[in-house]
Amino acid sequence: MISKNKKINSFVEYTKSETKKANIKCVLANVKYLVIKEEGYVRCNGYFDEKNMLLKCAINKPITEWLPIFVHEFSHFEQWRGQCETWKKCFFAGEDKTSEIIEWVKGKEVKKGLLKKYYKALKYLELDCEKRTVKNIRKFELPIDLDDYARKANAYVLFHDYIYFYRKWYKVGRVPYDNKNIIATMPNKIVPKGRVATKKQLELYDKFCS
Ligand SMILES: [Zn+2]
């Protein structure tokens, strides 16, 4: 059993059985963070990787920290399983817009028009995922504070504007959704599609994440 909480256990069981049906391996790893080899050994807390058919989450930390990430990654799995529009726009014909953006941040040149397309595809993929995550938290009655989650989710979604405008990613240990100053500027409901980070928020990202 992963937790004393029945709702959490049944959500974890549900995720395991749904991913299994789709031939996706679901791994709750007893480590503090995961390392993605393909992306230059970057550290992360969880991921859904459709190429390697894997949903993985680092759980050697308080459940309040890993559970929201696990639900988020499960929601990416649902996007992939349903082949929703935002997923298809991001992973069309073997292309992966995430890697394109990461390469561009590292210095690879990408045509301006294409770059804007990639950035929007990625931002909207995460936005759609956050909306699904909130729905899943409600649906499975998980013990996650929704106002708090929405603020953190917004901090992550709007961070994509920062990546696009500043050509920078966050540094290890400086994730935007963990910074109190940034979270305090975020609304407690998931932002609408047209919302772009304010000047102040962009400055805060630059100060606390890069
Ligand atoms: Zn995501």
Image (cartoon, rainbow, N blue to C red):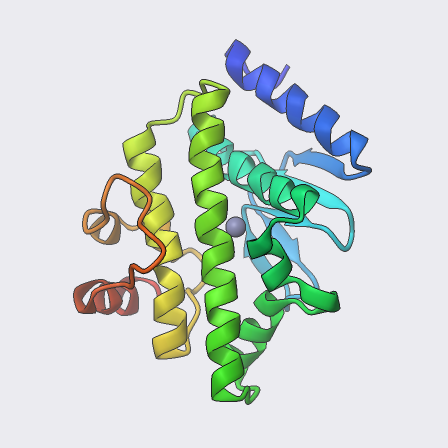
Q: Where on the picture, by quarter, is residue 188?
A: top left
Residue 180 is left or right of residue 165, and the answer is left
Residue 93 is left or right of residue 120, and the answer is right
* Relative vertical location of residue 159 with respect to residue 58 in this rendering, above or below: below
Q: Quadrant of the C terminus?
A: bottom left
Taking depth in this image into account, of 120 and 27 the one nearest to the observer is 120
Taking depth in this image into account, of 31 and 48 the one nearest to the observer is 48
Residue 27 percent coordinates (x, y): 70, 35
Residue 150 percent coordinates (x, y): 33, 40
Residue at image position (54%, 46%) is 45
* Relative vertical location of residue 43 with respect to residue 189 in this rendering, above or below: below
Taking depth in this image into account, of 72 and 62 the one nearest to the observer is 72
The residue most toward the front is 85
Residue at image position (47%, 87%) is 112
Residue at image position (66%, 28%) is 15
- Regarding residue 80, the answer to whether it shows in the image is yes
Q: How many marks?
A: 0
- Regarding residue 4, the answer to whether it shows in the image is no
Residue 160 is left or right of residue 115, and the answer is left
Taking depth in this image into account, of 39 and 100 the one nearest to the observer is 100
Q: Quadrant of the N terminus?
A: top right
Residue 101 percent coordinates (x, y): 54, 73
Residue 13 percent coordinates (x, y): 67, 20
* Relative vertical location of residue 174 with respect to residue 53 in this rendering, above or below: below
